[in-house]
Amino acid sequence: RYNMPFQDIREFISKCKQLGEVQQIEQEVDWNLEAGAIVRRCCELSAPAPFFQKIKDYLKGYRIFGAPLATFRRLAIAMDLNPDASFKEIMQTYIERKAKPIKPRLVKDGPCKENVIFGEDVDLYKFPAPYIHEGDGGRYISTWHVIATKDPDSDWVNWGMYRQMILSKNTLTGLVTPAQHIGIIFRQKYEARNKPMEFAVAIGPEPITTLIGAAPVPYGVSEVDIIGGIRGEPLDVIKCETVDLEVPATSEIVIEGEMLPKERKEEGPFGEYAGYRAIPVLPRPVYRVKAITHRNDPILTMSN
């Protein structure tokens, strides 16, 4: 194997730097459109991933890492393969490892608990969520992340990547369509029974977690087990503070709370990666945030 599985996004960034797949940007960058434009351009050019060290209006240490897996080289690095592995080799390895899932390992402590914030102190604007494209409905804090939600009728927990836009210091909204796994769980189960649904958002975990969060995994199959299979070792997870869910222990930022039934706020539009705004502004479910935990000097991962 090319490398040991990465324990966190920081190890991955460090390896990518060594291999010329990260460009560290020391100059101040504006969260308002500028960061989004640079990340977009890097994707168009298959350029190294931009790692913004100084964000306008934010304290030193609050950083943004853009387009983590937007090249095959970075995907190969994340999977512990030779950086110059062919796409065919990457896919064959992915298929082989996916067939051998490994259960996660529950740990008692982890870096994601270095800072713990509850109740009135919760402020999503503490993090440099970018306004990514001109015409977006707002600032999107969650574009490269996973959201954990539990099926109330089984022990299955879904981990998926579903965009989230900030509404206020302690509320988010996002695309929760009836066909998405999160939509099926929320609309057909919790909301149909008039019950709130707990959620946990993990931003900036080790790279395979977000890869699998965005991958097609069948309904009822636990992404966290697939993540273990792709990594070749169990993913360390840790219990949340206010909800009955577990998240990757080395996540940069964790957002906890619940979605209330029948509650809707307008969300979108959002510029899709293909260059269009495909879905109009519509009322979407609301994520009510009860707690945030984060690492010291947190890194916000983003895509566009």
Image: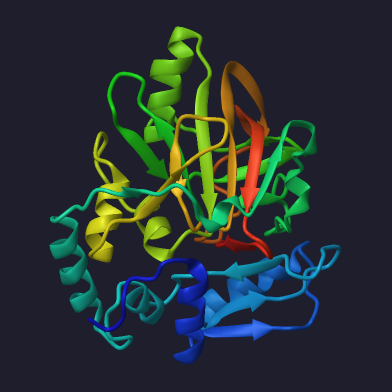
Which quarter of the image is occupied by the N terminus? bottom left
Residue 159: image location, x then y, percent: 39, 43
Q: In the rendering, at what x and y percent does residue 91 appear?
A: 21, 69
Location of residue 65 by image quarter: bottom right
Specify the quadrant of the image occupied by residue 165.
top right
* Residue at the outermost right position: 57
Residue 176 position within the rendered picture, expressed as x and y whole percent measured from the top left: 50, 33
Q: Quadrant where the C terminus lies? A: bottom right
> Looking at the image, which residue is at 22% across and 58% down?
229
Tell me which residue sits at (48%, 15%) in the image.
191
Of 45 and 156, the residue lying toward us: 156
Q: Up-down: is 90 above or below 274?
A: below
Figure check: 219 above or below 293: above
Q: Is residue 114 visible?
A: yes
Q: Nearer the viewer, residue 32 or 248?
A: 248
Query: Which residue lies most toward the top here?
Result: 193
Q: How is the image coloured?
A: rainbow
Across the whole image, how many numbered discs are drawn on residues? 0
Quarter-of-image position of residue 209: bottom left
Q: Is residue 75 left or right of residue 289?
A: left
Image point 56% across, 36% down: which residue?
241
Q: Residue furthest front?
A: 108
